[in-house]
Amino acid sequence: MSNIPTPHIAAKEGDFAKTVLMPGDPLRAKYIAETFLTDAVLVNQVRGINGYTGYYNGKRVSVMASGMGMPSMGIYSYELFNFYDVDNIIRIGTAGSISPKLKIRDVVLAMGACTDSNFAAQFELPGTFAPIASYELLRKAVQVVEEMGNIGYQVGNVVSSDVFYSDRQTTASWQKMGALAVEMESVALYMNAARAGKNALTIVTISDSLVTGEATTAEERQTSFRDMMKIALEIA
Ligand code: HPA
Protein backbone atom coordinates (compact mmCIF):
# COMPACT_ATOMS: atom_id res chain seq x y z
CA MET A 1 0.00 0.00 0.00
CA SER A 2 1.27 3.49 -0.91
CA ASN A 3 0.85 4.87 2.60
CA ILE A 4 3.28 2.30 4.02
CA PRO A 5 5.50 3.02 5.88
CA THR A 6 3.40 5.62 7.70
CA PRO A 7 4.76 8.69 9.49
CA HIS A 8 4.65 6.74 12.78
CA ILE A 9 5.08 3.06 11.87
CA ALA A 10 8.01 1.71 9.87
CA ALA A 11 6.72 -1.86 9.43
CA LYS A 12 6.34 -3.45 5.98
CA GLU A 13 3.10 -4.62 4.39
CA GLY A 14 1.92 -7.83 6.06
CA ASP A 15 4.15 -7.34 9.12
CA PHE A 16 1.13 -7.01 11.41
CA ALA A 17 -1.31 -9.81 12.20
CA LYS A 18 -5.06 -9.21 11.72
CA THR A 19 -5.36 -8.72 15.48
CA VAL A 20 -3.23 -6.27 17.45
CA LEU A 21 -3.13 -6.03 21.23
CA MET A 22 -2.47 -2.49 22.42
CA PRO A 23 -1.26 -1.73 25.92
CA GLY A 24 -0.54 1.94 26.62
CA ASP A 25 3.03 1.27 27.67
CA PRO A 26 5.73 0.14 25.17
CA LEU A 27 7.44 -1.92 27.90
CA ARG A 28 4.23 -3.90 28.37
CA ALA A 29 4.19 -4.64 24.65
CA LYS A 30 7.75 -5.97 24.96
CA TYR A 31 6.79 -7.99 28.05
CA ILE A 32 3.79 -9.56 26.26
CA ALA A 33 5.88 -10.44 23.21
CA GLU A 34 8.66 -11.98 25.32
CA THR A 35 6.39 -13.78 27.79
CA PHE A 36 3.40 -15.00 25.79
CA LEU A 37 4.33 -15.08 22.10
CA THR A 38 6.49 -17.56 20.24
CA ASP A 39 8.71 -16.57 17.31
CA ALA A 40 8.02 -12.88 18.00
CA VAL A 41 9.69 -10.50 15.57
CA LEU A 42 10.15 -6.77 16.06
CA VAL A 43 8.21 -4.97 13.30
CA ASN A 44 8.34 -1.35 14.48
CA GLN A 45 10.44 0.82 16.76
CA VAL A 46 9.62 4.36 15.68
CA ARG A 47 9.51 6.63 18.77
CA GLY A 48 10.18 3.64 21.01
CA ILE A 49 6.71 2.25 20.18
CA ASN A 50 8.05 -1.25 19.66
CA GLY A 51 5.65 -3.51 17.74
CA TYR A 52 5.96 -7.30 17.65
CA THR A 53 4.28 -10.05 15.67
CA GLY A 54 4.39 -13.66 16.85
CA TYR A 55 2.16 -16.60 17.68
CA TYR A 56 -0.09 -17.46 20.61
CA ASN A 57 -1.35 -21.07 20.60
CA GLY A 58 -0.61 -21.17 16.88
CA LYS A 59 -2.57 -17.97 16.13
CA ARG A 60 -0.66 -15.06 14.57
CA VAL A 61 -1.01 -11.97 16.74
CA SER A 62 0.70 -8.59 17.07
CA VAL A 63 1.28 -6.35 20.03
CA MET A 64 2.18 -2.66 19.95
CA ALA A 65 1.70 0.20 22.40
CA SER A 66 -0.82 2.99 21.83
CA GLY A 67 0.93 5.55 24.02
CA MET A 68 -1.23 7.62 26.36
CA GLY A 69 -4.29 9.61 25.41
CA MET A 70 -6.62 9.89 22.43
CA PRO A 71 -4.29 11.75 20.04
CA SER A 72 -1.74 8.94 20.38
CA MET A 73 -4.29 6.09 20.24
CA GLY A 74 -5.96 7.94 17.34
CA ILE A 75 -2.78 7.93 15.27
CA TYR A 76 -1.75 4.30 15.83
CA SER A 77 -5.23 2.78 15.50
CA TYR A 78 -5.89 4.80 12.32
CA GLU A 79 -2.67 3.67 10.67
CA LEU A 80 -3.13 0.02 11.70
CA PHE A 81 -6.76 -0.17 10.54
CA ASN A 82 -6.40 1.85 7.34
CA PHE A 83 -2.84 1.23 6.13
CA TYR A 84 -1.78 -2.10 7.65
CA ASP A 85 -5.06 -3.94 7.03
CA VAL A 86 -5.53 -4.79 10.72
CA ASP A 87 -9.08 -5.99 11.49
CA ASN A 88 -9.14 -6.11 15.30
CA ILE A 89 -7.52 -3.95 17.96
CA ILE A 90 -7.84 -4.94 21.59
CA ARG A 91 -6.74 -2.27 24.05
CA ILE A 92 -5.47 -3.59 27.36
CA GLY A 93 -4.83 -0.93 29.94
CA THR A 94 -5.64 0.50 33.32
CA ALA A 95 -8.43 2.78 34.51
CA GLY A 96 -9.55 4.61 37.62
CA SER A 97 -12.87 3.35 38.99
CA ILE A 98 -15.77 5.73 39.44
CA SER A 99 -18.35 3.04 40.22
CA PRO A 100 -18.61 1.79 43.81
CA LYS A 101 -19.36 -1.65 42.30
CA LEU A 102 -15.69 -2.01 41.28
CA LYS A 103 -12.84 -3.14 43.46
CA ILE A 104 -9.17 -2.47 42.79
CA ARG A 105 -7.84 -5.04 40.23
CA ASP A 106 -11.32 -5.80 38.85
CA VAL A 107 -11.63 -5.93 35.08
CA VAL A 108 -13.88 -3.67 33.01
CA LEU A 109 -14.99 -4.69 29.52
CA ALA A 110 -15.89 -1.41 27.86
CA MET A 111 -19.19 -1.98 26.05
CA GLY A 112 -19.32 1.77 25.39
CA ALA A 113 -17.12 4.80 25.82
CA CYS A 114 -18.15 8.34 26.81
CA THR A 115 -15.84 11.32 26.55
CA ASP A 116 -15.05 14.92 27.45
CA SER A 117 -12.92 15.18 24.28
CA ASN A 118 -13.64 16.77 20.93
CA PHE A 119 -12.35 13.76 18.94
CA ALA A 120 -15.76 13.14 17.35
CA ALA A 121 -16.00 16.64 15.85
CA GLN A 122 -13.94 15.57 12.79
CA PHE A 123 -16.77 13.28 11.64
CA GLU A 124 -19.18 16.25 11.36
CA LEU A 125 -22.20 14.31 12.55
CA PRO A 126 -25.50 16.11 12.97
CA GLY A 127 -25.73 14.80 16.54
CA THR A 128 -23.73 12.76 19.04
CA PHE A 129 -22.25 9.35 18.28
CA ALA A 130 -22.26 6.43 20.73
CA PRO A 131 -18.83 4.74 20.50
CA ILE A 132 -19.26 1.02 21.21
CA ALA A 133 -17.13 -2.11 21.33
CA SER A 134 -17.31 -4.84 18.73
CA TYR A 135 -20.11 -7.11 19.95
CA GLU A 136 -18.23 -10.18 18.70
CA LEU A 137 -15.04 -9.32 20.62
CA LEU A 138 -17.03 -8.32 23.71
CA ARG A 139 -19.06 -11.55 23.63
CA LYS A 140 -15.87 -13.63 23.41
CA ALA A 141 -14.23 -11.63 26.22
CA VAL A 142 -17.20 -12.25 28.53
CA GLN A 143 -17.02 -15.95 27.70
CA VAL A 144 -13.26 -16.11 28.47
CA VAL A 145 -13.60 -14.19 31.76
CA GLU A 146 -16.44 -16.47 32.84
CA GLU A 147 -14.34 -19.54 32.00
CA MET A 148 -11.35 -18.18 33.96
CA GLY A 149 -13.76 -18.02 36.88
CA ASN A 150 -11.94 -16.05 39.56
CA ILE A 151 -11.94 -12.57 38.03
CA GLY A 152 -14.21 -9.77 39.25
CA TYR A 153 -15.51 -7.88 36.25
CA GLN A 154 -18.13 -5.44 34.98
CA VAL A 155 -19.39 -4.69 31.48
CA GLY A 156 -20.50 -1.14 30.70
CA ASN A 157 -19.44 2.41 29.93
CA VAL A 158 -16.00 3.87 30.47
CA VAL A 159 -15.14 7.57 30.22
CA SER A 160 -12.25 8.51 27.95
CA SER A 161 -10.87 11.75 29.34
CA ASP A 162 -8.45 14.24 27.81
CA VAL A 163 -7.12 15.22 31.23
CA PHE A 164 -5.47 13.10 33.88
CA TYR A 165 -4.83 16.10 36.15
CA SER A 166 -8.05 18.08 35.98
CA ASP A 167 -9.02 21.33 37.65
CA ARG A 168 -12.65 20.25 37.41
CA GLN A 169 -14.26 17.55 39.57
CA THR A 170 -16.46 15.53 37.21
CA THR A 171 -16.43 12.07 38.79
CA ALA A 172 -19.82 12.46 40.50
CA SER A 173 -21.55 13.51 37.27
CA TRP A 174 -20.27 10.50 35.33
CA GLN A 175 -21.03 8.25 38.30
CA LYS A 176 -24.68 9.40 38.27
CA MET A 177 -24.89 8.18 34.66
CA GLY A 178 -23.59 4.76 35.63
CA ALA A 179 -20.15 5.06 34.04
CA LEU A 180 -17.75 2.53 35.51
CA ALA A 181 -14.24 3.89 35.13
CA VAL A 182 -12.11 6.60 33.57
CA GLU A 183 -9.23 6.08 31.14
CA MET A 184 -7.90 8.05 28.20
CA GLU A 185 -8.00 6.12 24.90
CA SER A 186 -11.17 4.13 24.12
CA VAL A 187 -13.25 6.76 22.33
CA ALA A 188 -10.52 7.34 19.73
CA LEU A 189 -10.12 3.59 19.26
CA TYR A 190 -13.86 2.88 18.98
CA MET A 191 -14.55 5.78 16.61
CA ASN A 192 -11.61 4.92 14.35
CA ALA A 193 -12.84 1.32 14.26
CA ALA A 194 -16.36 2.47 13.36
CA ARG A 195 -15.11 4.75 10.60
CA ALA A 196 -12.85 2.05 9.15
CA GLY A 197 -15.51 -0.67 9.46
CA LYS A 198 -13.22 -2.65 11.80
CA ASN A 199 -13.45 -4.12 15.31
CA ALA A 200 -12.25 -2.86 18.66
CA LEU A 201 -12.51 -3.70 22.34
CA THR A 202 -11.09 -2.14 25.47
CA ILE A 203 -10.25 -4.32 28.46
CA VAL A 204 -8.98 -2.43 31.51
CA THR A 205 -8.08 -3.35 35.05
CA ILE A 206 -8.79 -0.94 37.86
CA SER A 207 -5.47 0.50 39.02
CA ASP A 208 -6.91 3.14 41.33
CA SER A 209 -10.23 4.24 42.76
CA LEU A 210 -11.52 7.77 42.28
CA VAL A 211 -14.17 6.83 44.89
CA THR A 212 -11.94 5.70 47.77
CA GLY A 213 -8.51 6.96 46.70
CA GLU A 214 -7.15 3.41 46.99
CA ALA A 215 -4.42 2.41 44.49
CA THR A 216 -2.69 -0.80 43.41
CA THR A 217 0.93 -1.56 44.14
CA ALA A 218 3.28 -2.12 41.21
CA GLU A 219 3.20 -5.85 41.93
CA GLU A 220 -0.62 -6.02 41.96
CA ARG A 221 -0.65 -4.19 38.65
CA GLN A 222 1.68 -6.82 37.18
CA THR A 223 -0.56 -9.70 38.30
CA SER A 224 -3.82 -8.14 37.15
CA PHE A 225 -2.13 -7.17 33.91
CA ARG A 226 -1.27 -10.81 33.28
CA ASP A 227 -4.95 -11.80 33.73
CA MET A 228 -5.97 -9.17 31.23
CA MET A 229 -3.30 -10.20 28.72
CA LYS A 230 -4.61 -13.76 28.94
CA ILE A 231 -8.17 -12.61 28.23
CA ALA A 232 -7.00 -10.56 25.25
CA LEU A 233 -4.78 -13.32 23.84
CA GLU A 234 -7.53 -15.92 24.18
CA ILE A 235 -9.96 -13.83 22.12
CA ALA A 236 -7.33 -12.67 19.59
N1 HPA B 1 -7.68 8.75 35.05
C1 HPA B 1 -7.39 8.56 33.77
N2 HPA B 1 -6.77 7.48 33.33
C2 HPA B 1 -6.41 6.56 34.22
C3 HPA B 1 -6.69 6.71 35.58
C4 HPA B 1 -7.37 7.86 36.00
O1 HPA B 1 -7.63 8.05 37.19
N3 HPA B 1 -6.21 5.62 36.22
C5 HPA B 1 -5.64 4.83 35.27
N4 HPA B 1 -5.78 5.40 34.06
Image: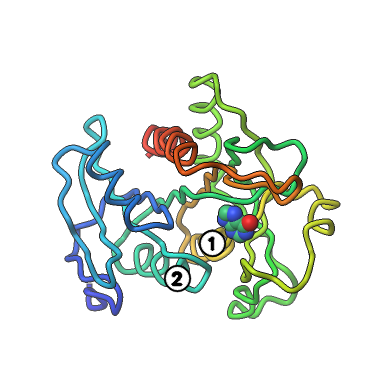
Measured as percent of width and height from the top left, residue 192 is found at: 50, 65
Tell me the residue at 67%/35% (across/down). Answer: 103
Q: Amino acid at mark 1?
A: Glu
Residue 183 shows in the view: no
Residue 96 in the image: above or below residue 191: above
Q: Amino acid at mark 2?
A: Ser
In front: 67, or 128? 67
Q: Can see residue 155?
A: yes
What is the crowding at mark 2: few (fewer than 14 residues within 10 Å), some, or many (at least 20)?
some
Reading the image, the residue beneath label 2 is 72
Going 46% across and 66% down the picture, which residue do you hit? 73
Number of numbered discs overlaid on the protein picture = 2
Q: Residues within 10 Å of mark 1 (few under 14, many from 20)?
A: many
Q: Quadrant of the C terminus?
A: top left
Q: Are marks 2 and 1 in contact (CB under 8 Å)?
A: yes
* Residue 116 shown left or right of residue 164 in the figure: right
- What is the spatial separation of the Cα atoms under label 2 and label 1, in whole angstroms? 8 Å
User: Mark 1 highlights which residue?
Assistant: 185
Ligand 1 shows up in the quarter that is bottom right
**Front residue of 136 and 121:** 121
Left or right of residue 6, residue 87 in this image? right
Q: Does the Cβ of the disc 1 residue fall within 8 Å of ligand 1?
A: no
Secondary structure of the residue carrying tag 2 is helix
x then y, percent, for residue 4: 23, 74
Q: Secondary structure at mark 1?
A: loop
Residue at 69% across, 71% down:
166
User: x, y (%) of residue 95?
Assistant: 59, 51
Instruction: Locate residue 122: give its quadrant.
Output: bottom right
Judge from the rendering whether residue 185 lies leftward or rightward of residue 83; answer left or right. Answer: right
Tell which circle, 2 or 1, labels the residue nearer the N-terminal end: 2
